[in-house]
C-alpha cells in the first residue's frame, strides 16, 4: 500500500472547502489508505488545515513548514520538508491549494515535489478563465469547493462531486412541502354523529333483549323502579 501527500495551506475557510476533495481521495486513489498532510504554519491566530481535516479524515503523518520570510529560517524549513518527503516517500501528491494560484506558482510547487521524490502529481494545474468566471445565476459549479474538486477529478467531477441542493432546488422542495400542508388543512373533517342518531340502534339492541321498549326506558331502569 502506498501513501499520498496532500498539499494544503490557508486558513479555516480554505480548509473547509477542501474537505469534499479530501474525502474523495479514497475513490480516486484506492491503493492509498492513509495520507501525509503538508501545510504551512503562518501564525497562532489562524487555524491550521489539520484542525479541520482531523474531523473529516485524520492524516497519519503531518509536516508543517514555516511561512516564507526570505531568510535562513525559511530555507532551513524547506530543506527539512524535502528530507521528510524523501523519508516518507509518498507516491502521489494531491494539490488542494487555493484556486487563484497562478501557473507560475503551480510550476514552482510541481518542481519542489519532484525534487522531493513524488512520482505522480494530481491537480497541479491552473484553472481557466472560463472556469473561474461565475455565472449570472449562481450554481454549485461556481463554488470554490467544486472547482478544487474539478481540478483533481477533471471531467468526472460532475459525477463524483457530492450531491447537494442548490438554492433553486431547495426553494422548490420547501414550496412543495408548504403546498402539501395547505392541502391537508383544507380537507374537510369527517362529520361527527350526534347522540340522537344512535337512539334507533340502541332501541333495536334493547328490543332484542326484552322484546319491546317501553317509552324509551331501558329494562334495567324499569326493574329498578319496580323495586
Image: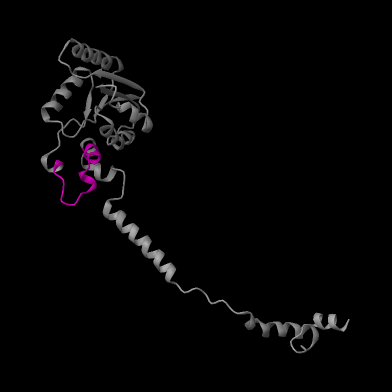
Q: How many numbered discs, if any?
A: 0
Q: State the scheme by which the image is colored.
A: one colour
Image x and y of residue 147, in percent: 21, 39
For residue 138: magenta? yes
Residue shown at 40%/68% (left/top)? 183
Image x and y of residue 205, in percent: 73, 82
Image x and y of residue 32, in percent: 33, 28
Q: Quadrant of residue 181?
A: bottom left
Q: 87 above or below 108? A: above
Closer to the camera, 189 or 91? Answer: 189
Q: Quadrant of residue 174?
A: bottom left
Closer to the camera, 223 or 47? Answer: 223
Instruction: Residue at the far right: name it.
Output: 227
Residue shown at 67%/83% (left/top)? 199
Q: 201 above or below 100? A: below
Q: Tell me which segment is drawn in magenta.
A: 132-150
Q: Quadrant of residue 23?
A: top left
Question: Is residue 12 visible in the rendered structure shown here?
Answer: yes
Image x and y of residue 157, in percent: 24, 42
For residue 153: magenta? no
Which quadrant does the N terminus fall into? Answer: top left
Residue shown at 31%/54% (left/top)? 170
Relative side of 38 to 218, left or right: left
Question: Is residue 32 visible in the rendered structure shown here?
Answer: no
Which quadrant does the C terminus fall into? Answer: bottom right
Closer to the camera, 122 or 214? Answer: 214
Closer to the camera, 31 or 84? Answer: 84
Relative side of 103 to 36, left or right: left
Residue shown at 65%/81% (left/top)? 198
Amino acid at each position: 500500500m502506498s501513501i499520498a501527500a496532500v498539499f494544503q495551506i490557508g486558513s479555516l475557510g480554505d480548509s473547509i472547502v477542501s474537505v469534499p476533495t479530501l474525502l474523495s481521495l479514497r475513490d480516486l486513489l484506492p491503493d492509498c489508505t492513509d495520507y501525509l498532510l503538508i501545510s504551512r504554519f503562518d501564525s497562532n491566530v489562524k487555524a491550521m488545515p489539520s484542525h479541520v481535516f482531523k474531523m473529516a479524515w485524520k492524516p497519519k503523518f503531518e509536516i508543517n513548514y514555516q511561512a516564507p520570510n526570505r531568510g535562513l529560517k525559511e530555507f532551513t524549513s524547506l530543506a527539512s520538508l524535502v528530507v521528510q518527503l524523501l523519508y516518507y516517500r509518498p507516491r502521489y501528491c494531491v494539490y488542494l491549494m487555493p484556486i487563484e494560484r497562478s501557473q507560475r506558482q503551480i510550476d514552482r510547487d510541481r518542481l519542489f515535489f519532484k525534487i522531493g521524490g513524488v512520482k505522480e502529481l494530481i491537480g497541479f494545474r491552473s484553472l481557466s478563465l472560463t472556469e473561474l468566471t461565475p455565472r449570472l445565476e449562481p450554481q454549485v459549479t461556481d463554488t470554490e469547493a467544486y472547482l478544487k474538486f474539478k481540478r483533481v477529478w477533471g471531467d468526472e467531477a460532475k459525477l463524483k462531486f457530492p450531491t447537494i441542493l442548490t438554492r433553486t432546488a431547495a426553494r422548490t422542495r420547501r414550496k412543495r412541502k408548504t403546498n402539501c400542508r395547505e392541502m391537508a388543512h383544507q380537507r374537510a373533517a369527517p362529520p361527527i354523529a350526534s347522540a340522537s342518531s344512535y337512539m334507533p340502534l340502541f332501541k333495536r339492541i334493547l328490543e332484542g333483549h326484552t322484546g319491546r321498549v317501553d317509552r324509551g326506558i331501558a329494562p334495567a331502569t324499569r326493574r329498578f323502579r319496580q323495586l
